Image (tube, helix red, strand yellow):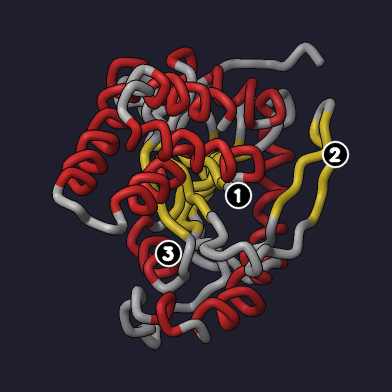
Amino acid sequence: MGQAKDIIRAELKSRSSNPFFQQVLSEYEKVAPNLDAYIFCMSTGSPTCVPPQDILSQWRAYGQDGRGASLTLDAFKLGRLVSNTPGLRINPVIYRRAIQARFINEILGRGLIAHTNNNPNAREATIAALVFATPLMKAPGFEEEHEWRLIFMPPQVDLMPRLGFRARRDFLAPYIDLIHLWHDLRPAMVAIPSLRATLPPLLPEVNPPLVPVIEMMVGPSGHQLLNVRAFSKLLVQENRTGVTILQSNIPYRSLS
């Protein structure tokens, strides 16, 4: 988020001779410091790996150094959950600096056209588009992750979620529960006519708040078979029927 804000600021400052972009920059600077996005990171995997999620760098960085598991989600069911929740969306991450700049330039160009055509909402719409874009950029060094993000950004300042916190390495990480988002926050959002109008009809087969897991791959630890047994018991306990369990093919043993 910090890097994305810097990129947006740089693009706006490069156009600071235009009063419209001066105003956009001023307004964006007001919202940027307190801009929150709650992100669940996903990946399409690597096209050079079979299976595509079996990537050693990912196991080391995000899979407890091989001791964890990778979950495969049903994209269709996840999409139905997203489409029925205001403020929730799925977007791919942009890594390359040239594409990031082109993306922001497109937003600014359209905003300027709207302003030139005397659209009274041009400035607000441009700022909203920049806010939308802020969680979508990441440093090029992460490109091999092929990341997609499930993003929740509260659509109004008075609709902030209840946060939980977990100790994560050297910082305290806030998070929100999908159960809370669906059962507590969503009814409050749907009660607002302008937000409710953005939603499709709620289909009866939509059954949140369970994340639609269809497959689990157990990481390449030294106790892989024990982990397979443990995860199998966990799935039964959580009533997760029909989830296929795979094992990583990488002959990796953690030194920790």
Tell me the quadrant of the picture where the C terminus can be found: top right
The foreground one among 191 and 109 is 109
Dot 3, how many residues are within 10 Å of its Cα: few (below 14), some (14-19), or many (20+)?
Answer: some
Q: Amino acid at mark 1?
A: Tyr
Q: Secondary structure at mark 2?
A: strand
What residue would you read off at disc 1?
38
Q: Amino acid at mark 2?
A: Ala
Q: Is residue 162 above or below residue 100?
A: below
**Label 3 vs 2, first from the N-terminus:** 3
Q: Is residue 83 above or below residue 254?
A: below
Discs 1/3, front: 1
Contact? badges 3 and 2 (CB < 8 Å): no
**Label 1 vs 3, first from the N-terminus:** 1
What residue would you read off at disc 2?
167
What residue would you read off at disc 3?
82
Q: Amino acid at mark 3?
A: Val
Q: Is residue 125 above or below residue 53?
A: below
Mark-to-mark CA distance, 1 and 3: 14 Å
